[in-house]
Amino acid sequence: MSDNADRRPLKTRQQAWARRFARFFVQQGVTPNQISLASVGLALLGAGAYWGSNTERPLLRLILLLLAALCIQLRLLSNMLDGLMAVEEGKKTPTGGIYNELPDRIADVIFLVAAGYAAGWPELGWIASLLALLTAYVRALGASFGFKQDFCGPMAKPHRMFTLTVGSVLSAFLPSLPILAITMGVIILGSALTIMRRTFHLNRNLSGHHDN
């Protein structure tokens, strides 16, 4: 895991229940890196649910889309827990930075691509996943220059996953509307704006740094 200054600000990290969960996993001998990898497993499960949601059976479709939404939230929970276990519970490892970032990017791509196929617009899923990777790249690029990591939105990872969760739930209950396709469009537009904002911030920081 990265230093505290480079951690994504999360209010839920301060909640007592979150710390209890982290402590429980540590006591069971689970490592932060294993929790990070679990997020990829959850993404694969969610992708399978999205894939199966293209069914003519309404009840099954509803269940699978709700399962996909649940997997998204469990993925975010694992992303929070690995940091709590590493930092607050003192289980940080030399390779933690790799496990903190790489599974996140993989999970993003899996969820977004699968959601695009579930929406009937695979292209939207691939575009959304590309832009998600670019938002993370610009953040990491800024950090490589020595600046504090920029987690600004409007479509950072928590925002993307929240939007996709809401879209999946609404789509489950309103099957006659193209809600998932609209959701992917919102994620694409928001991600593009996020990339522009982060690039602008980085350019400003570099210009100011050079002037000094």
Image (cartoon, grey):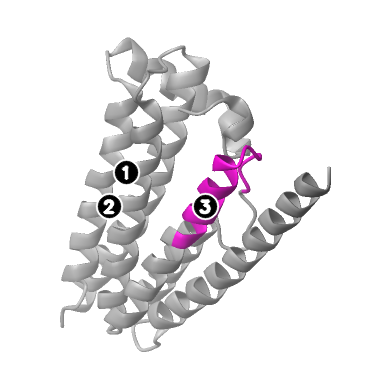
Amino acid at pointer 2: Ala
Q: Earlier in the sequence, mark 2 or mark 3?
A: 2
Q: What number is the disc on residue 43?
A: 2
Vertical position of residue 165 compared to residue 98: above or below: below
Look at the image and give the residue range highlighted in magenta: 134-150
Q: Earlier in the sequence, mark 1 or mark 3?
A: 1
Quadrant of the image for the N terminus? top left
Is 120 or 205 nearer to us in this picture?
Answer: 205
Return the x and y of residue 194 as percentages of the image width and height: 60, 64
In percent of width and height, residue 143 lies at 57, 41
Graded by Cα atoms within 10 Å as few (under 14), some (14 to 19) or many (20 or more), the crowding at tag 1 reads: many
Residue located 75% across and 56% down the image: 204
Q: Please tell me the numbered disc located at residue 116.
A: none
Residue sitting at x 30%, y 52% = 106
Q: Secondary structure at mark 2?
A: helix
Quadrant of the frame with the C terminus: top right
Magenta region's main secondary structure? helix
The residue sitting at 76% across, 48% down in the picture is 210
Q: Which mark is residue 158?
A: 3
- Residue 103 bears which disc, if any? 1
* Residue type (three-letter) at the residue carrying disc 1: Pro
**Secondary element at image label 1:** helix
Mark 1 or mark 2: whose residue is earlier in sequence: 2
1 vs 2, front mark: 1
C-alpha span from label 2 to label 3: 15 Å
Q: In the shown orientation, is residue 125 left or right of residue 63?
A: right
Q: Residue furthest right?
A: 212
Mark 3, secondary structure of its residue: helix
